[in-house]
Image: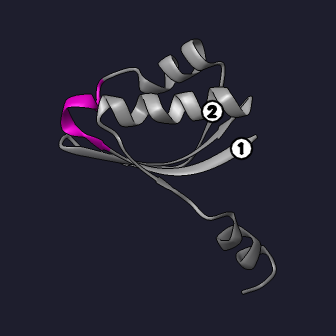
Amino acid sequence: MKRKLFCTIPQRLIKQPLLFTLVNRFQVVPNIRGASVTETIAILSLELEGEPANVEQAVQYLIEEGVQVEELDDREDSAASAGG
């Protein structure tokens, strides 16, 4: 299963090894699709792949840690690849 997410990471979490934790604790594969990091905030377009239960637990972990997580709609990608 793959889920595409848009994550807003607050300043207090920027230096935390969040992706490392996702891999080790939840056995998911993160794919960074885009990112912007400053000293005060990080935004991350992220694709998580793995077993459905593991992906869900990984997303819940991010939320519980304080990451704002928004689900990205696959239809946007389909429309873009179909030419609009």
Q: Is residue 11 magenta?
A: yes
Which quadrant is home to the N terminus? top right
77 vs 37, nearest the viewer: 77
| Picture disc at residue 2 | 1
Identity, as a three-letter code, of the amino acid under mark 1: Lys
Q: Tell me the element at label 2.
A: helix
Question: Residue 47: x and y, percent?
Answer: 62, 44
The picture places residue 5, in percent across and down from the top left corner, at 53, 50
Which residue is drawn at the image coordinates 81% and 80% (left, top)? 82
65 with respect to 35 (left or right)? left
In this rendering, the answer to whether 24 lies above or below 42 is above
Instruction: Look at label 2 and name its amino acid.
Output: Val
Mark 1 is surrounded, within 10 Å at the Cα level, by few (under 14), some (14 to 19) or many (20 or more) other residues, namely some
What colour scheme has been applied to the protein in the rendered image?
one colour
Query: Mark 1: which secondary structure?
Result: strand
Please tell me which residue lies in front, 80 or 55: 55
Range drawn in magenta: 9-15
- Report the quarter where the C terminus lies: bottom right
- As drawn, 67 above or below 25: below
Q: Confirm whether the magenta stretch covers residue 72.
A: no
Q: Quickly name the residue at label 2.
A: 55
Q: Taking 43 as reference, is 74 above or below it?
A: below
Q: Earlier in the sequence, mark 2 or mark 1?
A: 1
Can you give x and y, in whole percent of width and height, for residue 15 in the image?
29, 25
Q: In this orientation, which residue lies closer to the viewer: 81 or 72?
A: 72
Instruction: Assess whether mark 1 and mark 2 are in contact (beta carbons under 8 angstroms).
Output: yes
27 relative to 60, above or below: above
Lateral position of residue 3 relative to residue 67, left or right: right
Q: Quadrant of residue 9?
A: top left
